[in-house]
Image: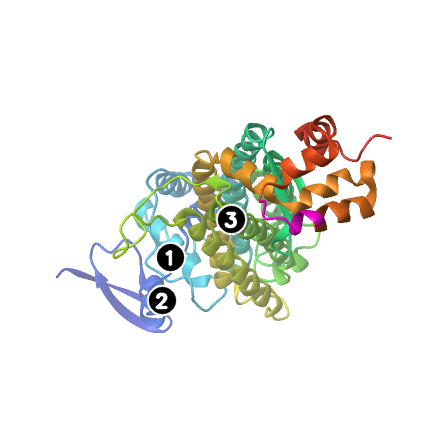
Amino acid sequence: MNTRTEQDFLGNIELPADAPWGIHTARALQNFPISGTPVPASLIRALAQVKKACALTNKELGYLPEEKADAIISACEDMLISGVESPLPALQGGAGTSTNLFVNEIIACKAEAGVHPIEDVSLHQSTNDVYPTAVKVAAIQELHSLAASVEQLQGTFQRLESRFAHIPTIGKTELVDAVPLTLGAEFGAYAEAFARDRWRTFKCEERLRVVNLGGTAVGTGLTAPRSYIFLVTDKLREITGLGVSRGENLIDQTANADAFVEVSGILKACASNLLKICGDLRLLHMNKKIKLPAVQAGSSIMPGKVNPVILESVMQIGIKVQANDFIITECASRGSLQINEFMPLLASALLESMELLNAAAKMLANHAEGIVADEAECARQFNSSIEIVTAFLPSIGYERATELVETFKKTDRSDFLIYLTEKLGADLVEKTLAPQNLMALGHRE
């Protein structure tokens, strides 16, 4: 096998002659033999955008020769078009240094033209400003996709709200019959929850726009020219189309990761809604008020069995996102002094949560479109529930309502609605239990 030898201050390493990276990546692969979770592709893409912004800045200010700068810029653009899969695991020490050096080496190998991965590609940069900035860029881009998926989810449930608005049903508290409402109102409540998720997801981008690019190692900008520090974030904004801005206090932005915890909390809220609503849909399906689309055989032994697998998958995503929130919180709080050493795990958990929620929202929206109501079963359960009498309290009072219920229990009848009609008259029953009256937000005097 043809090889090449590369050297750093620790010694020499032989690499395959056609290896697309260099000695620093080779050492990282030796040091972190961890399988399972690679560095997120969205983070590698964001790092390429950051490196392009840095090269454009250094070219404009004359710190890089034009030929080298153009070669770096071209290599970054190639990475953005074709993508690069990282061989490195997400769980790596060094606050992201291995991933930063990997991207530097990939760009240098692509660029050729005598481009050095540190002297040229990483000019005026540190992992400590480049990596957190790239995490924020990747996170904002993922948030845009997530917000669009949650918007689709909200729209789906709003359509179901309208579709089921005419169907009376019995609400439940403590899993026991409570008071009447409409099936549409139940789905309208879900739509409102997703509307809040959409708004929160959209707004939390603001928490990620402030970056520390140009701060270098600890936020003081040491080794970087002032002109570069004041220009590089503008270049990043032009490249990404995102409203990123340089932090007023770059030492703070380098040392503290609380913004990621705040964003993760919003993701956890979305996960919480998904868990709750999918759990409700399973109950409604089990109670035969709705029918979920059948998507696959549910058993290898029970013929014809169909399970609510889409809901179960979404719920598992919700649990994973909640677990990731704990990881992100831990990572942010474990940083020390002027750096957060655990940024790689934080980045992996945060971006994974966004990707998972994006998938979950799309899955649930597409699945929910096929939900149908069993109107006959809803009517049967509604008519047989003694709790529909609660709607008549303004007309007949609590004592009279209790008397009707107790008298009915002594019969062998099952249709309470017919019994009420006999006792109170068809006009009062129809008026009181009409869907528009049930949802009128209080009775009229």
Q: Nearer the viewer, residue 325 or 127?
A: 325
Dots 2 and 1: beta carbons under 8 Å? yes
Spatial CA distance of label 2 from label 1 is: 9 Å
**Residue at mark 2:** 28
Identify residue type, mark 3. Answer: Cys
Q: How is the image coloured?
A: rainbow
SS of the residue under disc 1: helix
Q: Is residue 441 magenta?
A: no
Give the position of the C terminus as an image quadrant: top right
**Residue at mark 1:** 102
Looking at marks 2 and 1 on the same chain, the residue that comes earlier in the sequence is marked by 2
Where on the picture, by quarter, is residue 77?
top left
Instruction: Pinpoint residue 169: horizontal percent, then vertical percent.
Output: 60, 39
Q: Nearer the viewer, residue 22 or 440?
A: 440
Please provide the residue range marked out in magenta.
Answer: 407-413
Outermost residue on the right side: it is 445
Spatial CA distance of label 2 from label 3 is: 42 Å
